Image: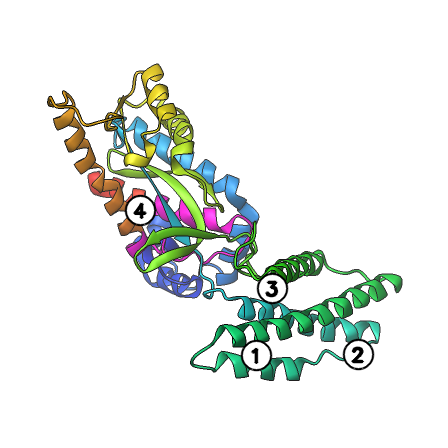
């Protein structure tokens, strides 16, 4: 699992690479060279889901405990920052999202309809033709988008009614309906209600907006960066200590990173058993609450003084400038992780898959750093 993030290979490519590489086999604990496939690639996918997020958190804690005891990681001042880890999803638009829901409903209706003996009229061919006609248009006007969205809403509403009726028929006959289908059906209903509400009110924003049918937990997070006005994925609050990166907080919502300062400090104490000597972050972290917290805990912080600029030279000015330069290290680590450890595209779709992907990628990166120091 760690080699997957170290190499950036797929499950199939990784299993093939391990069967040819004695160093990877030694890393995985093989006592002798094995030329056959060590396991089936699907085992990795099943294992991730079976182990779950708590296993990866425990693996992190045990690994970092060993590195700290051997003084490979030293308890120095902490640098903090936050970033979004984008999901591997198609860029969302309302018409495309509704069409994805409609296609799943039609497939499930046909499959379950054969079992219960029903064959409702889904209008799937006509709906597909309308969607393709719209998607192939080079210039999509507001009027064309509204018209296509209205048509998709009507098709989805019809298919939802048909799907519910088939589920009721299956239960009346004593047939078991899989929990995964019921969960997907609820997501489809929620997407329809959200899109209908936005269409009716003629707005583009709504609370807890779903942008992916297969990953309904993903939320749009507005970043305001050039080329990335909005990102779709989980937001992580990270800290860097002695060149090692740690994930302290992760959520699929657009939270303010300055509000999770206490989480950073708690995570530091859990790892090193004491408070950090210094705390360095960008200007967002310099709220009055955070300044008071640092004063109470006697932690030296690198926040600019509030109020007007003093006429005299600030006594901590040189230390502050050096710390802000040092803060570039965590920016570089985040870029390195996204470039070389696939943290720019989360590809796990299992439960808590986003956080598992991020934690495994950061752990792989930290192990590489530790190996260089050893």
According to the picture, the residue beneath numbered tag 3 turns out to be 199
Name the image quarter holding residue 77: top left
> What percent of the width, then of the height, locates residue 109?
73, 72
Q: Secondary structure at mark 3?
A: helix
According to the picture, the residue beneath numbered tag 1 turns out to be 131
Report the side of 71 relative to 358 (left or right): left
User: Mark on residue 92?
Assistant: none
Judged by depth in the image, the label closer to the viewer, 2 or 4, is 2
Does residue 40 appear in this view? no
Judged by depth in the image, the label closer to the viewer, 3 or 4, is 3
Q: Is residue 219 magenta?
A: no
Q: Earlier in the sequence, mark 3 or mark 1?
A: 1
The Cα–Cα distance between marks 1 and 2, rounded to whole angstroms, is 23 Å
- Asked if the residue under mark 2 is in contact with the one under mark 1, i.e. CB atoms within 8 Å, the reply is no
Q: Which residues are magenta?
A: 338-365
Q: Earlier in the sequence, mark 2 or mark 4?
A: 2
Q: Secondary structure at mark 2?
A: loop
Judged by depth in the image, the label closer to the viewer, 1 or 2, is 1
Taking 203 as reference, is 356 above or below it? above
Q: Earlier in the sequence, mark 1 or mark 4?
A: 1
The Cα–Cα distance between marks 2 and 4, rounded to whole angstroms, is 53 Å
Name the image quarter holding residue 188: bottom right
According to the picture, the residue beneath numbered tag 4 turns out to be 365
The Cα–Cα distance between marks 1 and 4, rounded to whole angstroms, is 43 Å
The Cα–Cα distance between marks 3 and 2, rounded to whole angstroms, is 30 Å
Taking 316 as reference, is 368 above or below it? below
């Amino acid at each position: 699992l760690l080699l997957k993030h170290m190499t950036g290979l797929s499950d199939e490519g990784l299993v093939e690479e391990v069967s040819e590489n004695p160093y990877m086999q030694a890393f995985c604990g093989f006592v002798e060279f094995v030329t056959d496939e060590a396991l089936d690639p699907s085992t990795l996918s099943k294992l991730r889901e079976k182990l779950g997020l708590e296993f990866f958190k425990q693996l992190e804690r045990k690994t970092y405990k060993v590195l700290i005891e051997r003084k490979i990681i030293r308890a120095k001042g902490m640098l903090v920052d936050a970033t979004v880890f984008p999901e591997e999803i198609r860029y969302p638009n309302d018409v495309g999202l509704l069409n994805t829901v409609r296609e799943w409903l039609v497939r499930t209706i046909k499959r379950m309809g054969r079992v219960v003996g029903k064959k409702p009229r889904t209008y799937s061919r006509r709906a597909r033709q309308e969607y393709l006609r719209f998607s192939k248009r080079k210039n999509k006007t507001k009027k064309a988008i509204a018209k296509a969205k209205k048509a998709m809403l009507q098709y989805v509403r019809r298919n939802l009614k048909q799907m519910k009726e088939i589920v009721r028929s299956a239960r009346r006959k004593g047939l078991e309906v899989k929990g995964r289908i019921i969960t997907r059906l609820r997501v489809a209903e929620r997407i329809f209600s959200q899109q209908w509400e936005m269409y009716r009110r003629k707005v583009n924003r709504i609370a807890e907006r779903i942008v992916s049918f297969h990953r309904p937990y993903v939320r749009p997070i507005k970043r305001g960066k050039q080329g990335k006005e909005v990102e779709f994925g989980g937001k992580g609050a990270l800290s860097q200590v002695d060149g090692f990166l740690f994930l302290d907080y992760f959520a699929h919502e657009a939270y303010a990173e300055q509000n999770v300062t206490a989480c950073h400090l708690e995570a530091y104490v859990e790892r090193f058993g004491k408070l950090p000597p210094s705390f360095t972050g960008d200007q967002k972290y310099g709220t009055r609450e955070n300044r008071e917290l640092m004063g109470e805990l006697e932690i030296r912080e690198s926040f600019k003084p509030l109020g007007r600029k003093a006429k005299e030279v600030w006594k901590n000015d040189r230390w502050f400038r050096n710390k802000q330069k040092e803060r570039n290290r965590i920016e570089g680590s985040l870029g390195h992780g996204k470039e070389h450890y696939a943290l720019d595209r989360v590809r796990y779709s299992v439960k808590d898959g986003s956080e598992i992907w991020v934690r495994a990628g950061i752990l792989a990166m930290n192990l590489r750093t530790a190996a260089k120091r050893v």
